[in-house]
Image (spheres, rainbow, N blue to C red):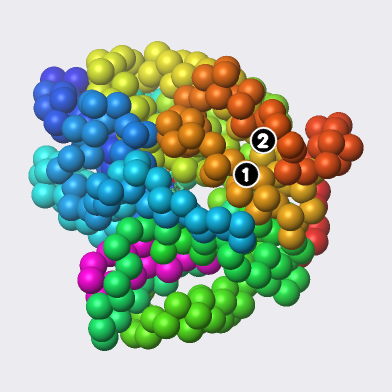
Amino acid sequence: MTGRDCDIAIIGGGLSGGLIALALARLRPETSFRLIEAGPRLGGNHRWSWFASDLSPAGTDLMAGFLKAEWDHGYHVRFPDYRRHLHTPYRSLASSDFAARLERDLPEGSILTNREVAALDAGGADLADGTRITARTVIDCRGFAPSPALQGGWQVFMGRHLKTPEPHGVARPIIMDAKVDQLAPHGNGGAYRFVYVLPLGSHELFIEDTYYADNPQLDRSALSARIDRYQQQMGWTGEPVGFETGVLPVITGGNFRAYQQGQRVEGVALAGARGGFAHPLTSYTLPIAVQVALSVAENADLPGEQMAAKLEAAARRHWAAMGYYRFLGSMLFGAAKPEERYRVFQRFYRLPARLIERFYAGRSSLFEKARVLIGKPPVPVTRAVGALLSSSPLITDPSRKAPHEHS
Ligand SMILES: Cc1cc2nc3c(=O)[nH]c(=O)nc-3n(C[C@H](O)[C@H](O)[C@H](O)COP(=O)(O)OP(=O)(O)OC[C@H]3O[C@@H](n4cnc5c(N)ncnc54)[C@H](O)[C@@H]3O)c2cc1C
């Protein structure tokens, strides 16, 4: 008897917390845990996508049991100058299917939903209802925390799930359709805009309007009207059956140690977007959340202090490894005029498919990094130098930020 409620308390039942719980249940069934989520269901209202090439074999295995959309024949991109079919398989998981599997596969009593954590420490979590859950190791997975220690821009989007009365005829995802008006909705400055389309079934589409914007304003009605217009252009009619919105940071710089210091609760491990485990340019976290989940399972016996130190060190290594992608992000936001940002991607997508795969997986080789940068630059050199010398806006809480307020 340890006198504790469980070995590991996972705070936040979103993507990273859910995957850690799943990895523990599968790989370390002797470890007891609680997955504590404030919302009514695990995973919230999201759709998470990734390239099959983003995951290791062990990661692919962890994700295998989820009911998800799979496109084994790759995807398309479209730009004003060309379109291309890339053959890398693509995957997408709805949070409802994420929650359904966890509810099925996690041990009885390990999931606590509608339970907000009011405070946490190295020995456990205090819930808002007054209950305390004690644990040997506490892992904080409460999602991204904006911080003035980080700089960058924003990826702002709205996705619509549409049921069409007739087969829509789209066979593969369109990851980027940048043949659309590049101006951001009224009041949101300039942006790189593209539409993202997933054919989820013969009569089902997911259509997302996305901006790489200078400020985090999400204008729901403008984005919805733009999806209407895109549907019209493509000749798709039907009933919207769901939607999601997102405002994700695109981190281009900052002081990561100061960020970690700001989030740290002594002896508590940090994972997920809050821990800094994201691709800075795409804001995607799924591939790295899978790796972190596997690593937590492998080290499930570690006391809280040691788990915290291990994940903190892993996050710092990740930050160092992502330097190149932050640099590209600052070029995108600082060097390219908003309406010209699409050129950066248009040029990038002409590169070899393997290079593109490794770029998204955050594993570009030195040669590949150089290859992205050499040749005729898509932005003027003087602006590029200016972008690197100037500092980017801070990543503070989007809900508190006024339009056009950059720092
Ligand atoms: C709409 C949307 C779409 C995205 N699409 C992709 C994608 O396609 N691919 C990809 O890789 N990434 C995507 N991302 C980015 C990123 O992967 C997700 O944000 C991901 O969910 C981050 O995982 P996380 O576990 O860190 O945080 P979250 O998944 O946000 O989970 C945090 C959880 O903690 C809970 N919580 C917070 N505070 C408390 C508390 N006090 N007590 C208890 N629970 C609490 C929240 O309710 C939430 O469920 C997307 C993000 C959004 C918003």
- Secondary structure under the numbered disc 2 in the rendered image: helix
Which image quadrant for residue 180?
bottom right
- Secondary structure under the numbered disc 1 in the rendered image: helix
Count neighbours of disc 1 (C-alpha within 10 A) and say few if under 14, some if 14 to 19, many if 20 or more: some
Q: Earlier in the sequence, mark 2 or mark 1?
A: 2
Q: Is residue 183 above or below residue 226?
A: above
332 displayed left or right of 155: right
Q: Residue at x 76, y 63 (%)?
A: 189
Q: Residue at x 27, y 30 (%)?
A: 59
Residue 392 included in the magenta stretch of the image: no
Q: Which of pointers 2 and 1 indicates the residue nearer the eye?
A: 1
Which image quadrant for residue 192?
bottom right
Q: How many marks?
A: 2
233 displayed left or right of 181: left
Q: Which residues are magenta?
A: 198-210
Q: Residue at x 66, y 45 (%)?
A: 344
Kind of residue indicated by mark 1: Arg
Q: Is mark 2 within 8 Å of ligand 1?
A: no
Q: Position of residue 399 (x, y in %)?
A: 64, 60
- Disc 1 marks which residue? 347
Q: Which mark is residue 328?
A: 2
Which image quadrant for residue 41?
bottom left
- In space, the residues marked 2 and 1 are separated at their CA atoms by 13 Å
Q: Position of residue 84 (x, y in %)?
A: 46, 51
